[in-house]
Image (spheres, rainbow, N blue to C red):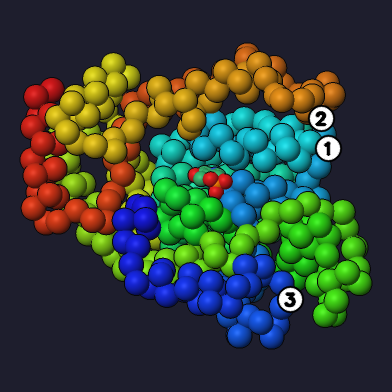
Amino acid sequence: MPGFEIFGDEERKEVQDVLDTGVLFRYGFDQARKGHRKAKTFEAELSKLTGAQYCHLCSSGTAALSIALAACGVGAGDEVIVPPFTFVATIEAVLEAGAVPVFAEIDETLCLNPDAVNAVITPRTKAVLPVHMCGSMARIDEIKDLCDKKQLVLIEDACQAIGGSFNGKALGTFGQMGCFSFDPVKTITCGEGGAVVTNDENLYKIAEQYADHGHDHIGDDRGLEGHPVLGTNYRISELNAAVGLAQLRKLDYILKKQRVHKKAIKDALAQFPEVSFRRIPDENGDSATFLSFFLPDESKARKIAGELGNAGVDACFYWYDNNWHYLRQWDHLKRLKSAAKLPAELFEHCQNYDEINLPLSDKIIGRTISMLIKLSWTEEELSQRIEKIVEVIGKH
Ligand SMILES: *Cc1c(COP(=O)(O)O)cnc(C)c1O
């Protein structure tokens, strides 16, 4: 998965362009920048790649989620339906918006179950925020239909799923807005960075204004620009955008490599009747950043995950015990331990997160192991890895 495995002259060249001009800011300085607009170029290329009309590059995936929520009008007291299996940033962004996260069960796609989403909709529900976890997709067509029917905002957290698609349509382009992350461990990286995509010009405008203190970016005197909305600073620097631009141009290569590596490991695991695989609604659209599979029960899964690690099979994840990716270990959220009082606490309909019970999700995540798919494995390393995996699982 990680683009950092393949940094090279391409990234160096893009960064050098920026350093040569001395313009690290994405706006203005038209003469001094000598034609280099890394953030803007990145946005044009990501638009093209996803088929979304508009794209705004920002400082992180978390910022992208905050921007999308703000642009879509999700704010104080609004309920946002989220999955319990994600990186905790998804929930942080909802709380940051002053909104109230409402958890719904996932299914064997490892993403929100549309029926479970339907079951927790209330008159206060404003948005649904599915997460395309670990490189593959939610049942996004069904979730989209549900949102349309109930007139809910759909924002996709595609932070881990750039390059993924469902029936040929890019993940991140099904709802009002889609969010991507380019942090240091994502499929491609800016060092730190994120992006929102949309087909709605108005949402795009609010997004790019909000992410830069409300600047309307009209005219050539920044001090005289209008401020149609209050905003904040989620800008990306040209240096970060430059790294990302070189990485974005490697995405095809990355996806191809991941798919080959993933298939080899998956084929080898398929010989074990006790192993079953994550449900992927469209196999062709899998970005193949992870291979996720199920074992018959929690104790077996935990044991095998440990043994894989001991056998030197690195980058295996047992999410059920992980502190960052599954609700079970989010004690800080369960007790709403925040740095300062959260708007969500002011609303009576804010759930007591300590009492949330998601037995179906527990059952699924308890049995799940995910393996990160790396780019840099040589053929020999890959076959040694497969040998070790087969040996460990074969023992059970
Ligand atoms: C990485 C990630 C984020 C946050 O992205 P950052 O760029 O690290 O802020 C949000 N959601 C998911 C699912 C992620 O994996």
Amino acid carrying mark 3 in the image: Gly
Query: Dividing the picture into quarters, in which one does residue 94 lie?
Result: top right
The number of numbered badges drawn on the structure is 3
Amino acid carrying mark 1 in the image: Ala
Residue 63 coordinates in the image, percent (x, y): 65, 49
- In the rendered view, tell whether residue 73 sits above or below residue 167: above
Left or right, 322 with reference to 224: left
Residue 354 coordinates in the image, percent (x, y): 62, 15
Callouts 2 and 1 close, C-beta under 8 Å: yes
Q: Secondary structure at mark 3?
A: loop
Q: Residue furthest top?
A: 355
Residue labelled with disc 3:
28
Residue found at x 43% / y 62%: 163
Residue 362 coordinates in the image, percent (x, y): 45, 23
Residue 117 coordinates in the image, percent (x, y): 62, 37
Classify 10 Å Cα crowding around label 3: few (below 14), some (14-19), many (20 and above). Answer: some
Residue labelled with disc 2:
343
Nearest the viewer among 334 and 34 is 34
Residue labelled with disc 1:
76
Mark with earlier residue (2, 3): 3
